[in-house]
Amino acid sequence: MELLVTLLIILPALYLAATRSSYLLDYAFFVVALNRGIRRLVDYYLNGAFNPLSTISLTPLIVSALLLIPAFSRFHQLTPRSRNVAMLIMVALGHGMVIGFMNAGIGAVYSLGEWLAGFGAFLFAATAPVGSRTADRWLKSSGYSALLVALYGWFQYLTIPVWDAFWVTEVNFVGYLGQLRPTEMSVFSTMHERGPCASFLAWAAIPMILHSRWRILGGWLTIVLLFSVVVLTMSRSMFIIVGLVAILQPALSKGRGLGRVLFFAGLLAIGASYGLEHMPGASRITKRFDTMKDIQKDGSYQGRLEIFTAGIPWVLQHPLGLGLGSSGFGAGRIGGGVKEGWCDSGYIEVFSQFGWIGGLAFFAAMAQIWGELTRRIRLGSRDPFLFTGRAVLLGCLVFLYVGNVFGGFSLFWVFLGISLNRFTRPVPQPRPVPQPVPHFFETPQPILTHA
């Protein structure tokens, strides 16, 4: 039954990939959002036991990898600068795969699949022969899949479904996620952890905050709902990246969208001062978020600072890195991975997976994305994907200090791909044809008429 469910999830993606349909990316959002919830139902009701190697958990990687089929067939449609970006990322992945396979074996393959999920989404969005209407639909599909995650998140928080409680017990997350009692457990909804759940919801909300054209049913109320569940995950870091991108958007766009950002800031202020006190389990939530008032004494912040500080000399001493599979999904899939993992510091993890060659190639690709978006804006394009794309990219690079947001499928990969798509290029303006100026002494020619 588990294999049958896996097949039923993958078959629509196979059809969409074979027909080169743009809806393959819409479908990928829903598979990423819901696959772990489906897996827990299958484990509880059909298997009667928890399967740590369930094939259902691989469906996001498979569906995301299918994005590469139409993407590579359209690779020649990339602009030369966008092609350079893709090649640099492939250099990083290739180096990480070679070193990783020698160190971690099959774990490197799983980790490569995780990276290809994000890269496939990026390449698919960059090469698709679509316009702004389809690109807007992709962002709205992300929003609607996040809406399902948020609605289930509140249901999970208030009831603790038996299949979720079964999974929490089996993976020994009791205590880490709280207690298996309503309003006393951190929400992870249909995702595999509370952090990825918060990340998925926050990234879906960011475009809605920045532009009205990307909002879905419910508008600002839906945005409030998504962030209410981010609060229930007890994940504080996502508020940092949301705040970063929201501030960077008007700062990089000469004040455009400042009103929306101020309105969102007002909503957050109201939510923090009034909403938190009236949420179920308010005391536990407030205690968790109060630590952000004094970041210097926050254990999580201090731990990441120590990892970053210790990681710099380690990177300098290991020019080849450890390769893919040393951390992340690949390491977990094979039951551990190599000893050194830097998953709580994104910059260190990138260099530990890719080494000097791959790490520099990866960040060179990010620099070229920034340069290309800036070039298109200077040439006259006013597409909102370009302005927001720069804010998203810079926000991710700052947030990389906290964790590796690049190593998996995420909306920001899609957003960067859309930003490099051909339809965001400036439309060439026709040059005025100079009219001949008559000579001062030129004698007008007689007009001949027929009698």
Image: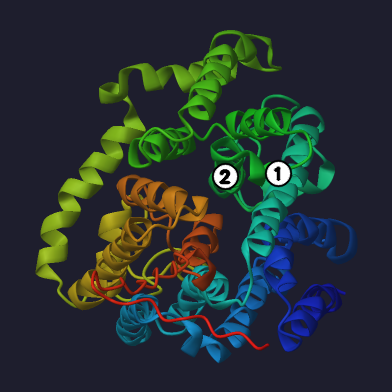
Query: Mark 2 or mark 1: which comes first in sequence?
Result: 1
Horizontal arrangement in the rendering, residue 250 relative to residue 347 (left or right) = right
Colour scheme: rainbow
Query: Label 2 amino acid?
Result: Pro
Q: Which mark is residue 367?
A: none
Horizontal arrangement in the rendering, residue 123 relative to residue 165 (left or right) = left
Q: To which residue does mark 1 refer?
A: 189
Quarter the N terminus occupies: bottom right
Secondary structure category for the residue under label 1:
loop
Q: Nearer the viewer, residue 57 or 9?
A: 9
Residue 193: percent from left, percent from top: 59, 48
Query: Does 386 sit above or below residue 157?
Result: below
Q: Is residue 287 visible?
A: yes
Q: Nearer the viewer, residue 356 or 91?
A: 91
Q: How many residues crowd around disc 2 within 10 Å: few (fewer than 14), some, or many (20 or more)?
A: many
Query: Label 1 amino acid?
Result: Ser
Q: To which residue does mark 2 refer?
A: 207
Q: Residue at x 68, y 29 (%)?
A: 220
Query: Does 89 sit above or below residue 152?
Result: below
Q: Nearer the viewer, residue 190 or 406?
A: 406
Residue 169: percent from left, percent from top: 68, 46
Quarter the C terminus occupies: bottom right
Q: Residue at x 68, y 60 (%)?
A: 133
* Mark 2 → mark 1, Cα distance in angstroms: 22 Å
